[in-house]
Image (cartoon, helix red, strand yellow):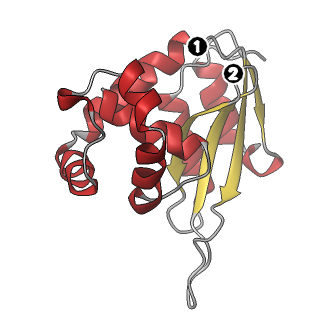
Amino acid sequence: MPLLAVLILPAMNGHSSLRGMCPWARAHAELLTARLSFHRQRIPALETFRTILCRLDLAVLLEALSAWLSACDAERISLDEKALRGSKRSLEGPLMVVCAFGQRVGLVLGQVAVQGQDRTEAALALLERVPFEGKLLTLDAGLMVRPVVQRVVEKGGPT
C-alpha cells in the first residue's frame, strides 16, 4: 500500500506520469519514509513502480476504491460528460468519458469511457457502479434521456 500512496501524492501535486512521480517522491523521501512503512526505508526505483503497476489486478483495485468511496458519504453526485484534456489525436476526437463526481467530497467517484457516440450506454454502465440510492443526483443536460432517468428511478434515486 505505501507504493500506491507514493503514486497518489505526486498525482495530487500535478504529476501525471511515473517519470514525474518518482522524482517528486525522491524529493520528499524523508517525509514519506517516516510516515509510510517501506522495506529498507527508501523510495523504490522507477522500474519497481512500473513492475508493480503492471502486475496490479485492476479489478481488485477498483473494487477496493469503490468500497472506500461508498464509505465517503457523497451526498450529492453529479453525472457529466467530459472530454479528457490532451487526448485529442490528429484524425480522432478527444477521449470522452461520463464521470460521477461527489460534490461534498470533491472526488470523481467513477468514470466510463464513451464508446463511439453513445454517452447513454456509458451513463447506464456508470449508474450500475456508483451507489446513489438516497442521494441527490444531478445529470448533465445531454444525459437527461429516458433510459438514464428510468435507471435512476429503478435504482431508488430521488424523483
The residue under the point 63% across, 11% down is 73
* Quadrant in the picture for residue 156: top right
Distance from Cα at disc 1 to Cα at disc 2:
7 Å
Element under disc 2: loop
- What number is the disc on residue 105? 2
Amino acid at the residue labelled 2: Val
Q: Is residue 150 left or right of residue 44?
A: right
Q: Nearer the viewer, residue 45 or 61?
A: 45
Q: Nearer the viewer, residue 32 or 52?
A: 32
Q: Residues within 10 Å of mark 1 (few under 14, many from 20)?
A: some
Pointer 1 with pointer 2, Cβ within 8 A:
yes
- What number is the disc on residue 72? 1
Q: Quadrant of the C terminus?
A: top right
- What number is the disc on residue 94? none
The residue under the point 20% across, 49% down is 48
Residue projecting furthest to the front? 30
Q: Is residue 45 left or right of residue 15?
A: left
Q: Locate residue 119, reporting x and y percent.
A: 61, 55
The residue under the point 61% across, 72% down is 94
Q: Locate residue 140, reporting x and y percent.
A: 79, 44
Residue 56 versus residue 54 in the image, above or below: above
Q: Nearer the viewer, residue 112 or 2?
A: 2
Label tally: 2
* Quadrant in the picture for residue 59: top left
Element under disc 1: loop
Q: Locate residue 128, reporting x and y percent.
A: 48, 30
Amino acid at the residue labelled 1: Cys
Q: Is residue 67 left or right of residue 96?
A: left
Q: Locate residue 24, reporting x and y percent.
A: 48, 49
Residue 20 versus residue 86 in the image, above or below: above
Q: Nearer the viewer, residue 110 or 120?
A: 110
